Amino acid sequence: MADNSQPASSEHALDRDCTTLSRHVLQQLQSFSADAQDLSALMNRIALAAKLISRRLSRAGLLEGVLGFTGEVNVQGESVKKMDVYANEVFISVFKQSGLVCRLASEEMEKPYYIPENCPIGRYTLLYDPIDGSSNLDINLNLGSIFSIRQQEGTDEDGAALDLLQHGRKQIAAGYILYGPSTMLVYSIGKGVHSFTLDPSLGEFILSNENIRVPDHGSIYSVNEGNFWQWDESIRDYIRYVHRHEGYTARYGGALVGDFHRILLQGGVFLYPGTVKKPEGKLRLLYETAPLAFLIEQAGGRASTGIQDILDVVPDKLHTRTPLLIGSKDDVSLVESFIRERAEEKTVSLTK
Ligand code: AHG
Ligand code: MN
Ligand code: MN
């Protein structure tokens, strides 16, 4: 029986240090086919984008022109940070000469960016949120990038990208980078959820946690309670419930990737509900809620709008938003039970 109290053998340590992201993808697919090589190369390019963004973030306070706003407003109606623009450009530059993706659809761009020479049929589209949690940028708190990969369907000759307006189960890969004390990349190609930690001395993402499973229940609820009076009564019922019952603790970092990562590892539920004024909520389906829903389902958890699974939502436009409940299946179901109860009461009162 191996004595686990001893440090890993040097052979094991070396093998672990060689489990890079691109190798892991090929191991996952158990194939060296052209498609497998493409996906492995795609993930490698995402890792390169992550390293470029991580490097700039780690020196943000020392360089001119990294922090602060550009003065522009993006298609989301949000003030754009210089880092949003930089990170968006990084993904485009990294994929331009890759021969891998035909289109890049970004939270920061009204329309997808086309790379015509990479558009033979069946090519990939990268959908991404280049910097998530940009309100944390100027205060040096954790940030993320979120990505999703879909296979192009049809020719999209008119550039309307209508084939992207499909449910989230069409995703072939999804993940995020967490720029925190260490830079981590978490991904799934539909065979479990795995995390890699950037080893700056190697310049490689090295496998650090394989087949991550979210606990069926956790004590954490993560929500911006500043919106309490803007929510539907059912959400207020849930918040009152966790306030009055032992065993719950609130954690909210203002950056979806960091708040999600905590829930993925420790269990619980993250909520970004709709409000009376904006029933569809704030978070974007194609670049935020659908990729994370893909991951949480792969890890044994759930993601819902409160009414239906996030992965079943079919967007009517590229920048569609959805409300989001995501995390441990028992905790997501508990929130949904309050929504169902209020809906049933409303139906009963309407039929009186
Ligand atoms: P982004 O920086 O990409 O616009 O995303 C910000 C999102 C998400 O990261 C976070 O969960 C949410 O905004 C926080 O919103 P509030 O500040 O309204 O709580
Ligand atoms: Mn975001
Ligand atoms: Mn963003």
Image (cartoon, grey):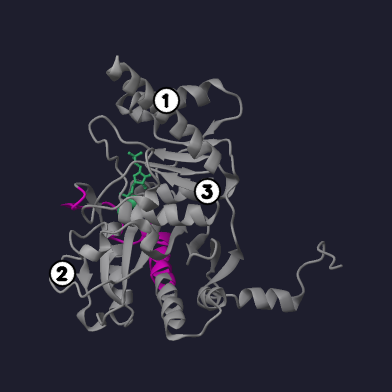
Pick out the residue farthest to the left. 158
* Residue at disc 3, secondary structure: loop
Q: Which residues are magenta?
A: 47-76
State the quadrant of the N terminus. Answer: bottom right
Which is nearer the eye, 219 or 158?
Answer: 158
Amino acid of disc 3: Gly
Indicate the quadrant where residue 172 lies.
Answer: bottom left
Give the label on residue 119, or none: none
Q: Is residue 138 magenta?
A: no
Pick out the residue farthest to the front. 351
Would you place residue 253 above or below residue 315 in this image? above
* Residue at disc 1, secondary structure: helix
Q: CA distance from mark 2 to mark 1?
A: 44 Å
Name the residue at 39% across, 59% down: 169
* Residue at disc 2, secondary structure: loop
Q: Residue 213: where, in percent of width, then height?
A: 59, 53
**Badge 3 density bin: few <14, some 14–19, many ≥20, Cα 10 Å:** many
Q: Nearer the viewer, mark 2 or mark 1?
A: 1
Amino acid of disc 2: Gly
| Residue 303 visible | yes
